Image (spheres, grey):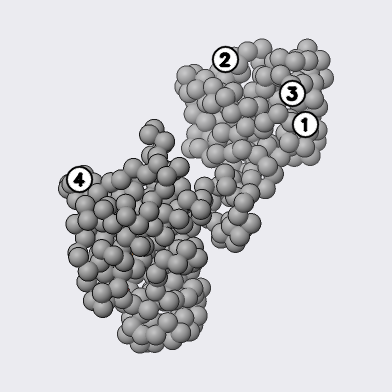
Amino acid sequence: MDLFEYQGKQYFARFDIPVSPGGVADTVDEAVVAAEAAGYPVVVKAQVKVGGRGKAGGIKLADNADEVREYAGNILGMDIRGHVVNRLWVEHASDIAKEYYASFTLDRPNKVHLGMLSAEGGVEIEVVAEERPDAIARISIDPTVGLDLAAAKAWVAKANLDAEAREQTAELLVKLYRCYTEGDCDLAEVNPLILTTDGEVKALDAKVTLDENASYRHPEWEEYAATDTEDVREKMAKERGLNYIGLDGEVGIIANGAGLAMSTLDVVNQVGGSAANFLDIGGGANAEVMASALEVINSDPKVKSIFVNIFGGITRVDEVAKGVIGALERVNISAPIVLRLDGTNAVEGRALLAEHLSDRLIAEPTMLDAARKAVAMAKKN
Ligand code: GDP
Ligand code: MN
């Protein structure tokens, strides 16, 4: 889950990482209140989960209430690369002497944490990485060892940061590493990390991605989930305890088990179709779960046919069949459904479904047949 900048900064602050004082605002009046509290000059910042807000006009410096009104009015409602601004962060403006870059992320193939630090921050790091790769000092951190102050100091020296910024930056990096590990982030990025004209080092921006696999030990993350702008279908699925990922195609897919769901995507592609989603209903494919899955897929207008691919193992196909029948009684499904039911109790399951079959509910003997049928139905619709 990605956080908004203001949430990222609040997260940083818990780990004692220096940030500027500020407040959130959803209206122009609230922006003025936040500005008065932070103290002028302030910076009015669009809160959207996309980078390059500065270039898009979503970040403005304001010296007084009139300017805050003008900029807040302009920025609220602005569309920044497909993200509409509904919230602002207004903080006391900093006098910038230097802009650096710092981040921690996972280096999955090497099973270590990757730290990146550069004296050339403020611009997109991808651009720096491409044009001047030497300007980024990388370190690999063994998660069982961690990052201590001595290692951070050596790293800061390697990155050629200005002498007066080194001590504070090293301390900040140790805190940022703690935030990243103890705070269960997949990414903690500060761009820019600044040295102010007063010689202070702090985080001027925050990009934080939380590792949702760790949400069980972070009840406090619920407030972030509440403001999360994820796909409505993904939200709906999560509420129903389903593993769902929205894609761009036209065949809705329901399968039991992530492996089978992935193979189903492949087979749909193989026969010339494309998947509208990935939905794994897991082991317990009862009527309740099946109805939920169909509801989620049904809410997607792009779906032109639904391919239910079940291979019964522990899951019994007759239970799945009851699930499908029960679900159809509860939910009015707009797309035709193609079923492939195999495995444990497949014969019983197919028998149960036999009298319910129609041109809207079709059973096919194999996965390939079912994929072909589902793709053909999608193209016809
Ligand atoms: P991004 O464009 O979405 O990455 O947003 P940032 O928060 O990184 O801000 C973009 C740029 O706005 C920064 O690189 C700064 O140059 C500028 N900026 C942001 N906050 C301040 C501030 O407090 N003072 C000054 N002078 N410039 C700021
Ligand atoms: Mn930035």
- Pointer 1 and pointer 3: residues touching (CB < 8 Å)? no
User: What percent of the width, then of the height, locates residue 78?
Assistant: 40, 66
Sequence-first tag of 4 and 3: 4
Q: Nearer the viewer, residue 290 or 258?
A: 258
- Earlier-in-chain disc, 1 versus 4: 4
In this figure, which residue is indicated by the disc labeled 4? 133
Q: Check disc 3 and report the residue beneath it.
A: 315
* Label 1 vs 3, first from the N-terminus: 1
Residue 45, given in percent of the width and then of the height, sits at 39, 70
Q: Which of marks 2 and 1 is nearer the N terminus?
A: 1
Report the disc number at residue 368: 2
Q: Please name the residue shown 57% across and 24% down the image.
A: 259
What kind of element bears circle 3?
Answer: loop
Determine which residue is flagged by label 1: 286
> Alpha carbon of mark 2 to alpha carbon of mark 1: how far?
24 Å
Measured Cα–Cα span from mark 2 to mark 4: 47 Å
Which quarter of the image is occupied by the C terminus? top right
Measure the alpha-carbon separation of dots 1 and 3: 9 Å
Residue 54's quadrant in the figure? Answer: bottom left
> Residue 28, image x and y in percent?
46, 79
Identify the secondary structure beneath mark 1.
loop
Q: Earlier in the sequence, mark 3 or mark 2?
A: 3
Q: Is mark 2 on a helix, strand or loop?
A: helix
